[in-house]
Image: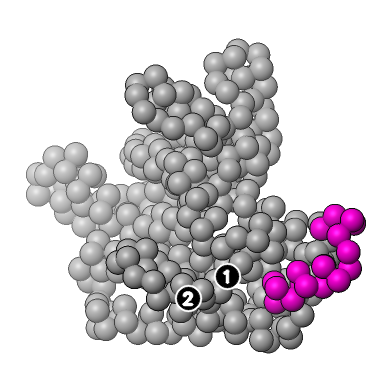
């Protein structure tokens, strides 16, 4: 297993480099100028100096390799200095956002907690709801519960967040006044009262995102359970006198989780990538909103860094899913 993991990590390096190159070239071909947001009162010579300071006057290949060096060498050294207290990166140029003129990773670290609070909680809630629904729907196939679960899942698949988000705001914020319509990212939890405020403002964005997660995972769970419930080993376990709970929750559930693990693992990077539409609907100052504003501003360093981090997470969680296969099914061996 260790050899397989190392081999996969080595093979992922050229893949990630190719992804970063493609993203960089797409941003280079995109229309727009990062200096377009500079006020017209700024003299042209000052704008030219600003372009040179941001590295815009350099050729594309030099800027690309410079970004690679900053991302893989400088930024890890900055983190090391922060952890240990050294000063190896003092005066070294980091990846700078063209829009905010500040280090990209500092902005990502500031925005990440908001995304993890909302999107991460929604993903956890969606999984906790989806797995029992999928298991029971398969066990009680074509029952009223199964039909209701199918109906809710179709709604979750069909209705996009840009519709459910405003709908919940109109219903629960405007009409009923139960929850705030705007997520306050400056709110700090210090006591029970502040925790209640935080809980209330998280309910609607979490509901919107958890609906999609529940719909997707519950359908995969149901299909996988139905496939395993009719297998020979299930009939053998029942013939041996094992209780129905042991047969379903131990034998069938463990084998059914193998394909579902892939769906859950591949959905994990979306937590760190943020939910662009939902974060903008509820004004959550997270990674998704940051990526959207960077795209509109043609902020190549910000977009390149965020998408590359997202690609790294996808490769990493793919590897985690493959390793979990071997844990769930002892027959699977990679070495």
- Apparent side of residue 59 relative to residue 231 in the rendered image (left or right): right
- Percent position (x, y) of residue 37? 81, 57
- Disc 1, SS: loop
Q: Which residues are magenta?
A: 38-56
Q: State the image quarter where residue 179 is shown.
A: top right
- Percent position (x, y) of residue 119? 49, 44
Would you say residue 164 sits in the magenta stretch?
Answer: no
Give the colour scheme of this rendering.
one colour
Label 2: how many residues lie within 10 Å, few (<14), some (14-19) or many (20+)?
some
Q: Which residue is mark 1?
A: 95
Residue that protrudes farthest toward the top in the picture: 176
Tags 2 and 1 in contact by the CB under 8 Å rule? yes
Q: Nearer the viewer, residue 97 or 176?
A: 97
Q: CA distance from mark 2 to mark 1?
A: 9 Å
- Apparent side of residue 206 relative to residue 335 in the rendered image (left or right): right
Label 1: how many residues lie within 10 Å, few (<14), some (14-19) or many (20+)?
many
- Percent position (x, y) of residue 270? 51, 54
Q: State the image quarter where residue 31 is shown.
A: bottom right
The N terminus is located in which quarter? bottom left
Q: Which mark is residue 141?
A: none
Q: Is there any visible trace of residue 111 in the rendered image? A: yes
Q: Which residue is mark 2?
A: 74
């Amino acid at each position: 297993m260790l050899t397989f993991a190392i081999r996969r990590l080595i093979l992922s390096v050229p893949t990630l480099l190719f992804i970063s190159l493609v993203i960089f070239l797409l941003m280079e071909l995109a229309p727009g100028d990062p200096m377009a947001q500079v006020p017209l009162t700024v003299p042209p010579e000052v704008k030219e100096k600003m372009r040179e300071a941001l590295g815009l006057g350099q050729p594309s290949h030099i800027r690309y390799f410079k970004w690679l060096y900053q991302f893989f060498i400088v930024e890890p050294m900055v983190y090391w200095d922060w952890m240990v207290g050294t000063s190896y990166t003092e005066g070294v140029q980091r990846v700078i956002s063209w829009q905010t003129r500040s280090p990209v990773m500092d902005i990502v670290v500031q925005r990440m907690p908001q995304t993890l609070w909302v999107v991460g909680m929604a993903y956890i809630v969606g999984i906790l709801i989806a797995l029992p629904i999928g298991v029971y729907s398969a066990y009680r196939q074509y029952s009223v519960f199964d039909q209701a679960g199918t109906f809710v899942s179709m709604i979750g698949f069909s209705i996009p967040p840009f519709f459910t988000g405003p709908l919940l705001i109109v219903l629960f914020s405007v009409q009923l006044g139960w929850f705030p319509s705007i997520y306050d990212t400056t709110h700090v939890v210090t006591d029970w009262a502040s925790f209640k405020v935080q809980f209330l403002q998280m309910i609607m964005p979490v509901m919107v995102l958890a609906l999609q997660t529940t719909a997707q995972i519950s359908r995969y769970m149901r299909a996988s359970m139905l496939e395993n419930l009719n297998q020979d080993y299930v009939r053998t376990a029942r013939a041996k006198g094992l209780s129905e709970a042991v047969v379903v929750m131990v034998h069938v559930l463990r084998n059914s989780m193998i394909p579902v693990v892939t769906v859950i693992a591949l959905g994990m990077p979306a937590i760190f990538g943020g939910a662009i539409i939902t974060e903008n609907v509820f004004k959550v100052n997270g990674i998704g909103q940051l990526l959207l504003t960077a795209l509109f501003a043609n902020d190549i360093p910000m977009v390149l860094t965020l998408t590359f981090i997202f690609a790294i997470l996808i490769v990493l969680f793919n590897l985690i899913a493959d390793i979990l296969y071997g844990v769930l099914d002892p027959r699977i061996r990679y070495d």
